[in-house]
Image (cartoon, rainbow, N blue to C red):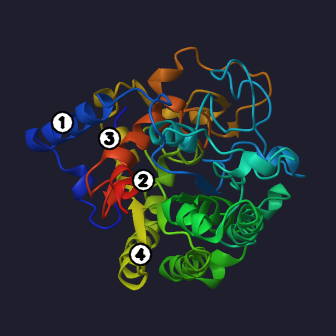
């Protein structure tokens, strides 16, 4: 079904029709899909990966929190040998697949009591479902690690690591390690777009709210630099108006344009922030992941990427299978690789694998100013 997705910076860009644009999309899709299989092979390109974010990259932290936002039940994990780990996916999520391309193991969840000692040498995942840039975002779900708390948790891990290495080795380790941040979705879905529970939409116009988020984000990114971390990938927010949860409120075959439009200032601001940080942070490289564009291409051209269903979830209830998300022991769709979305909010493993390849191998329109592979090769 055709998406009505529109970009925020220039509404015409993603709606360009004609053979030229279709050819470009087909070439990009062909390149991405033909990259090597996602397997841990060869030598690791980074010593460690530290992950901060929300449910898109949570690998089980919320299993250990008093939170409603959990995915520790089947059919979550159905394609991970029927093991629900707390990942909001039928299989692996974005950072699991990224770890494979980097040649390392996916970092363990911070909240797991066994995550200590030598287990933290390859990095730690602090991501928490319902967590946002703002401390208040997602609070109606119960406990979660917000961005600020995740940075505090990271500082605790680095204090442990410091005792395990010589000062010079520790400095080199931090310089070569990769930090991945995936935030922003909950600040909109579970804050700004919930006027019955949060006052932010009454207090801030969309550009003002985006600026609030960017300023908070910037402070924490500067903290990461002060800690000695030098390679940072920051994902933008995807077209939230096109996820099944939002489509369930829209006319048939439509995305919620108003939701997509208010994300423009945030994504633009994040890209600008990356420019500023790269100019003012000697020895560091910050990369902006253009999630909006990558997901938008898939939704506008699903068949090109091998998908047949882009407008509803594989597992869920109600309109577009998005009004109620995937419930315990619910029967999901059997042809999961044909779906862009696994549940009301999250992509399938197949969609994640495409997004990871675009971040890792893609041109500056996907990962700016360099892609993840190029970033890891920098001294």
Distance from disc 3 to disc 2, alpha carbons, whole Å, reads: 14 Å
Mark 3 and mark 4 lie on one chain; the one further toward the N terminus is: 4
Using the rendered view, name the quadrant where residue 164 is placed: bottom right
Q: Which residue is mark 3?
A: 300
Residue 308 placement, left or right of 146? left
The answer to whether mark 1 and mark 3 are in CB contact below 8 A is no
How many marks do you count on the picture? 4
Distance from disc 3 to disc 4, alpha carbons, whole Å, reads: 38 Å
The answer to whether mark 4 and mark 2 are in CB contact below 8 A is no
Above or below residue 100? Residue 124 is below
Mark 1 and mark 2 lie on one chain; the one further toward the N terminus is: 1
In front: label 1 or label 3: 1
Q: Which residue is mark 4?
A: 283
Q: Position of residue 213 (x, y in %)?
A: 57, 76
Q: Residue at x 58, y 14 (%)?
A: 334
Distance from disc 1 to disc 2, alpha carbons, whole Å, reads: 19 Å
Mark 1 and mark 3 lie on one chain; the one further toward the N terminus is: 1
Above or below residue 147? Residue 239 is above
Q: Which residue is mark 2?
A: 291
Mark 3 and mark 2 lie on one chain; the one further toward the N terminus is: 2
Q: Which residue is mark 1?
A: 27
Q: Position of residue 274 (x, y in %)?
A: 40, 73
């Amino acid at each position: 079904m055709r998406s009505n997705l529109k970009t925020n910076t220039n509404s015409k860009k993603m709606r360009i029709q004609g053979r030229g644009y279709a050819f470009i999309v087909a070439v990009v899709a062909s390149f991405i899909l033909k990259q090597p299989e996602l397997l841990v092979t060869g030598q690791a390109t980074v010593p460690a990966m530290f992950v901060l974010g929300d449910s898109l990259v949570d690998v089980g932290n919320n299993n250990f929190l008093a939170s409603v936002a959990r995915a520790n039940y089947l059919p979550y994990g159905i394609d991970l040998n029927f093991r629900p780990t707390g990942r909001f996916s039928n299989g692996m999520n974005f950072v699991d697949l990224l770890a494979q391309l980097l040649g390392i193991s996916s970092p363990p969840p911070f909240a797991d009591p066994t995550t200590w000692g030598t287990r933290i040498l390859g990095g730690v995942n602090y991501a928490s479902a319902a967590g946002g840039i703002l401390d208040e975002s997602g609070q109606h779900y119960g406990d979660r690690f917000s961005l600020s708390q995740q940075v505090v948790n990271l500082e605790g891990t680095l204090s442990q690591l410091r005792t395990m290495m010589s000062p010079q080795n520790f400095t080199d380790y931090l310089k070569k390690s990769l930090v991945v941040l995936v935030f922003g979705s909950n600040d909109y879905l579970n804050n700004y777009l919930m006027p019955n529970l949060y006052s932010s939409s009454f207090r801030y116009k969309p550009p003002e709210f985006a600026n609030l988020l960017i300023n908070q984000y910037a402070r924490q990114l500067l903290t990461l630099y002060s800690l000695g971390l030098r390679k940072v990938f920051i994902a933008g927010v995807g077209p939230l108006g096109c996820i099944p949860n939002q489509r369930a409120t829209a006319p048939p075959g439509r995305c919620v344009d108003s939701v997509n439009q208010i994300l423009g200032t945030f994504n633009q601001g994040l890209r600008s922030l990356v420019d500023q940080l790269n100019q003012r942070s000697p020895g560091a490289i910050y990369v902006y992941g253009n999630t909006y564009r990558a997901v938008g291409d898939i939704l506008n051209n699903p068949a090109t990427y091998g998908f047949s269903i882009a407008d509803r979830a594989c597992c869920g209830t109600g309109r577009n299978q998005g009004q109620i998300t995937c419930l315990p022991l619910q029967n999901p769709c059997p042809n999961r690789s044909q779906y862009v979305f696994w549940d009301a909010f999250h992509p399938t493993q197949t969609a994640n694998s495409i997004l990871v390849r675009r971040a890792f191998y893609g041109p500056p329109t996907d990962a700016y100013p360099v892609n993840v592979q190029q970033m890891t090769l920098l001294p």
